[in-house]
Amino acid sequence: MVKSKHPDEFRLSTGRIFYANCHIIGLSPDGRHPREGYDGGIDTSDWTSVEKKELAEYMIALWKKWAGI
């Protein structure tokens, strides 16, 4: 995952760009839908498994950093 000059933009290694308000990314309670900001969704219906994995690994790394592990 590459951070962009735009504060809300993410760029995946595949070149796909998506936006997350205030760089906030979460997951719906059912674990099926990525969310962004405080009330938006990230449309991943056409994402590849590689792109999904990249986002998941990015989020896992952030949570581990936060937890101190």
Image: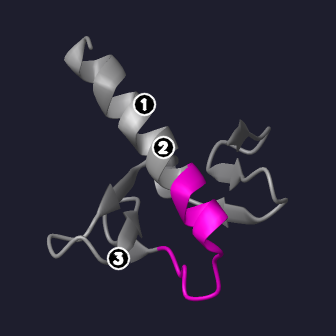
Which element is circle 2 on?
A: helix
Image vertical order of residue 69 relative to residue 26, above or below: above
Which element is circle 1 on?
A: helix
Farthest residue in the right direction? 15
Mark 2 or mark 3, earlier in chain: 3
Mark 2 vs mark 3: in front: 2
Residue 59 is situated, as x and y percent measured from the top left of the image, at 42, 43
Residue 3 lies in quadrant: top right
Q: Residues within 10 Å of mark 1 (few under 14, many from 20)?
A: few
**Drawn side of residue 15 relative to residue 53, left or right:** right
Say which amino acid is labelled 3.
His
Callout 2 touching callout 1 (CB < 8 Å) = yes
Callout 2 touching callout 3 (CB < 8 Å) = no
Q: How far is the residue under mark 2 from the one under mark 1?
A: 6 Å
Residue at 64% x, 63% y is 51
Mark 1 or mark 3, earlier in chain: 3
- What residue is shown with label 2? 57
Q: Out of 57 and 34, give the one closest to the viewer.
A: 57
State yes or no: residue 53 in magenta.
yes
Part of the protein shown in magenta? 42-54
State yes or no: residue 31 in magenta.
no
Residue 13 is situated, as x and y percent measured from the top left of the image, at 78, 50
**Drawn side of residue 33 relative to residue 67, left or right:** right
- What residue is shown with label 1? 61
- What residue is shown with label 3? 33
Residue at 79% x, 38% y is 5
